[in-house]
Amino acid sequence: MKKYFLDDHKVGEVIQCGTYEVSREEVIEFASKWDPQPWHIDEEAAKASFFGGLTACSAHIFSIFSIISPQWQNGVVIQALAALGFDNMRVHKPIYAGDTIRCVTRIDSARPSSSKPDRGIVVYASELFNQEDAVVFSITAATLVARS
């Protein structure tokens, strides 16, 4: 795998990231602990709800984003040191049990740190799409990245 440092980032570059299949069991298990609403944990109640089916809760969706956004399909491994913050997080559409989610990320900015020359800050704008190519989630993430 190729290591991807701060200086490798090209502003405006669009990266195809990982994919993830959301299972029924995972939706129920995650929400049972973190957001036990009927449309997340009970299939019959979910069918009768305004969602019309079992949906992942927003904390689960963020977790899916967190695991698939750094998994670039070209095998690159970002040399991330720390997450600095997340902005503009939006859930656009429900993610249903059985959906397959993919992540697309654009590099919005990349700059060296003004105080530590061995690192810098990259801002990524990411979107999650379902199998119908509908945007279901979006977020902007600032990340501290090592320099080569």
Image (cartoon, rainbow, N blue to C red):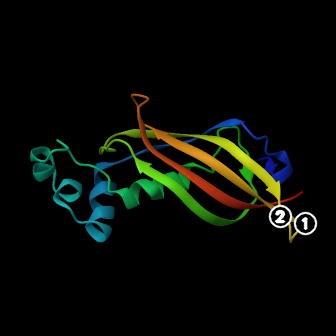
Left or right of 25 in this view: 136:
right
Mark 1 crowd level (few <14, some 14–19, many ≥20, 10 Å Cα): few
Residue 53 location, quadrant = top left
Res. 5 visible in picture? no
Which residue is located at x 10 percent, y 50 percent? Answer: 44
- In the rendered image, residue 135, in percent from the top left (x then y), is placed at 43, 36
Which residue is located at x 68 percent, y 52 percent? Answer: 123
Q: Secondary structure at mark 2?
A: loop
Which residue is located at x 26 percent, y 58 percent? Answer: 28
Q: With respect to residue 99, does 24 lie above or below?
A: below
Would you name the residue on which mark 1 appears?
Answer: 117
Residue 51's label in the rendered image is none
Residue 37 location, quadrant = bottom left
Res. 69 visible in picture? yes
Could you say which is closer to the camera, residue 111 or residue 53? 111
Q: Where does the C terminus fall, quadrant-wise?
A: bottom right
- In the rendered image, residue 130, in percent from the top left (x then y), is placed at 41, 36
Which residue is located at x 87 percent, y 70 percent? Answer: 116
Q: With respect to residue 14, does 57 lie above or below?
A: below
Residue 113's label in the rendered image is 2
Q: What amino acid does circle 1 point to?
A: Pro
Contact between marks 2 and 1 (CB within 8 A): the answer is yes
Q: What amino acid does circle 2 point to?
A: Ser
Left or right of 70 in this view: 11:
right
- In the rendered image, residue 92, in percent from the top left (x then y), is placed at 38, 43
